[in-house]
Image (spheres, coloured by chain):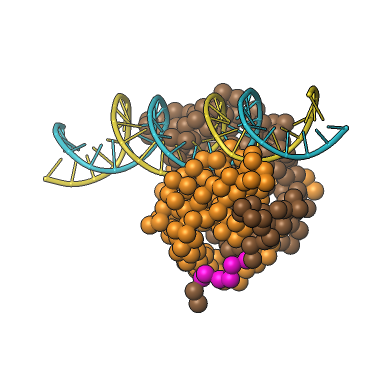
Chain colours: A brown, B orange, C yellow, D cyan
Amino acid sequence: MTASAAQTSPRKRSGNGAVRRNDAEEIGLDALVGHAGYAVRRFQIWIFQDFVRTLGDVDIRPTQYSVLTVIGANPGLSQMAVAKRLGIERARLVHLLDSLEQRKLVKRVKSKADRRSHALHLTAQGATALAKFKRLAAEHERNVEAKIGKENRERLLRILAGFT
Amino acid sequence: MTASAAQTSPRKRSGNGAVRRNDAEEIGLDALVGHAGYAVRRFQIWIFQDFVRTLGDVDIRPTQYSVLTVIGANPGLSQMAVAKRLGIERARLVHLLDSLEQRKLVKRVKSKADRRSHALHLTAQGATALAKFKRLAAEHERNVEAKIGKENRERLLRILAGFT
DNA sequence: AAAGATTGTTGTTGACGACAACAATTGTCG
DNA sequence: CGACAATTGTTGTCGTCAACAACAATCTTT
């Protein structure tokens, strides 16, 4: 079948081509409905904003949280390894770590095995801070549950498990 | 229950704190697994890239596609209405429309009813182009199906229907 | 008519991904 | 061993994108 389906009916228009709207949100999305990418993008924006808001007091953004979590679970990793695992660019991770190191959450230890690379570790302060971040992140996760439902959230995680 | 779960075991480390890795991707994500936001973000990146690649020949990005689709289905909308419907900022939409108008896909018609606003329409060229874009977008959608499965894609759309 | 709100526009800021270049170091291979 | 290639962290540039703020022109309200 060809993809060009029925055009959703253009609404009542006045002579020149302007359209009267009751102001409400009854604008057709047409082909956009049925596009997974569109739904995912809107959802991702919502999630992102809720995360930033929930972790607003501690000033931690999703990417920072992911970096801290991976370092916490795998102390001693190189920057290259962290970048590859999280799908972040080397160059980008440099700035992220600069920021986290300034805040005394992470330290770069010069590796003796390979003097090019840095072994990444949480500071003591970073470890306790991460524990707090995790509690807040769990709160955010409950917000997601409240938004889409407990079972739907689990379904979602199962469907997307391959992308982690 | 408190959210701070079991720490995933830090691996074998050498004296100074560096960690040997077989080089493979067996780095623990710890708390990241179980975060809907992380999975969604990775998935969104994959979808975005596939969309851009599939619509690469016609040089159309997801946001441009969404704008064209909405205008095509609702001719005469104002920029404000389109922006609000798609969750784009007014300011951002200005640049998007500048580009689409330069490419002769969209035209801004000065509305006589409200001389502040522009009524947005597809050009004839824009309409035929959009038909082609929709075919390519459908191809992209089949790629998504191939990636996560037909039923999973439908489940996903159902779960996220509220965000469109 | 005056005050306030809306629409499109311009500009700035900061997060982010994609690249390219570089020095220091390591690995490889003749 | 020694030249050459590859890797690691770093710096820088470019383009995309969201979030704001400010502005002129134009409604809308009172």
Taking the image as drawn, is residue B119 in sight? yes
Residue A116 in the image, given as x and y percentages of width and height: 37, 31
Please name whichever residue, A66 or B5, is drawn nearer the observer in this view of the structure.
A66
Please name whichever residue, A104 or B36, is drawn nearer the observer in this view of the structure.
B36
Taking the image as shown, residue A146 lies to the left or right of residue A67, namely right
Residue B125 in the image, given as x and y percentages of width and height: 44, 58
Residue at image x 50%, y 51%? B106
Instruction: Tell me which corner region of the image, top left, top right, bottom left or bottom right, holds residue A65.
Output: top right
Asked if residue A104 is positioned above or below residue A3 in the image, the reply reads above
Asked if residue A148 is positioned above or below residue B96 in the image, the reply reads below
Please name whichever residue, A75 or B54, is drawn nearer the observer in this view of the structure.
B54
Residue interval drawn in magenta: A3-8
Q: Residue furthest bottom?
A: A1
Residue A52 in the image, given as x and y percentages of width and height: 67, 38
Is residue B99 one of those drawn in magenta? Answer: no
Residue at image x 46%, y 44%? B99
Instruction: Tell me which corner region of the image, top left, top right, bottom left or bottom right, holds residue A151.
Output: bottom right
Taking the image as shown, residue A97 lies to the left or right of residue A26, namely left
Task: Please identify the quadrant where the C terminus of chain B is shown.
Answer: bottom right
Please name whichever residue, B5 or B162, is drawn nearer the observer in this view of the structure.
B162
Is residue A4 one of those drawn in magenta? Answer: yes
